[in-house]
Image: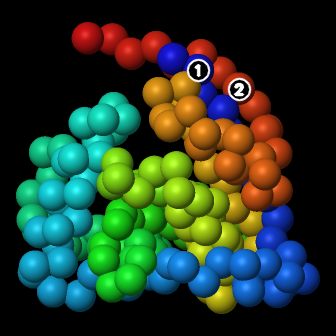
Amino acid sequence: MKSKYLETTLSLDDLAQKEEEYTEISSVIPSNAEDIDTVISYYKIIANKWGWFSRLQWSFEEWSNHILDNTTYFRFIVNNYNKIGFLELKRISRDVGLIKYVALLDEFIGLGYGKQTIFLIKKMAKENALNKLLVQTRDTDHPNALKSYLKAGFVILKQEELTFEK
């Protein structure tokens, strides 16, 4: 499996110019037990499709602690009051964030919401004093994931072949 590591720096000018273009989605912080259950359900649905297995066995308590961690920015992606997926941004140093997940339910893929979500993440990062974002994509991710990050101003830092033992 091939993996690519990308980065971008954040510009206030870039964010201001695009703000008006991206108004179809917003984000909501999971805030109660029902929301945590929805996160778990969405993760299982989306993880199985894209081969994300690291959190499939997490308990409700592990998810709750993770979402409430003050270095994790976990949000539902919302369109017309409907939760259509989730995003996760992790602060890994004082001014650097790592995009862990941009995850949309199948029926919302290919409608431009991924691009809007990347913009939302960049805006959220800037609001939280992050000046650089990193992300890893794999060839098992959605075929347009890499293209979307490149169009959003990310550049490839390195590429490697990953192997997993069974």
- Quarter of image, res 22: bottom right
Kindly identify the residue that appears in the image at 34 percent across and 48 percent down: 106
Q: Position of residue 157 (x, y in %)?
A: 79, 38
Task: Tell which of 14 and 109 is nearer to you.
Answer: 109
Residue 8, horizontal then vertical, whole percent: 79, 58
- The quadrant of the picture occupied by the C terminus is top left
Residue 93 appears in view: no
> What amino acid is at disc 2?
Gln
- From the viewer's perspective, tell me whether residue 117 is left or right of residue 72: right
- Amino acid carrying mark 1 in the image: Lys
Q: Pointers 2 and 1 in contact (CB under 8 A)?
A: yes
x and y percentages locating residue 114 in the rendered image = 55, 58
Instruction: Categorize mark 2 by other alpha carbons within 10 Å: few (<14), some (14-19), many (20+).
Output: some
The dot on residue 2 is 1
Count every numbered label the image shows and give the total: 2
Q: Which mark is residue 159?
A: 2
Q: Which element carries disc 1, helix, strand or loop?
A: strand
Q: Position of residue 21 (x, y in %)?
A: 72, 78
Q: Residue at x 46, y 14 (%)?
A: 163
SS for callout 2: strand
Please say if 134 is above or below 50.
below
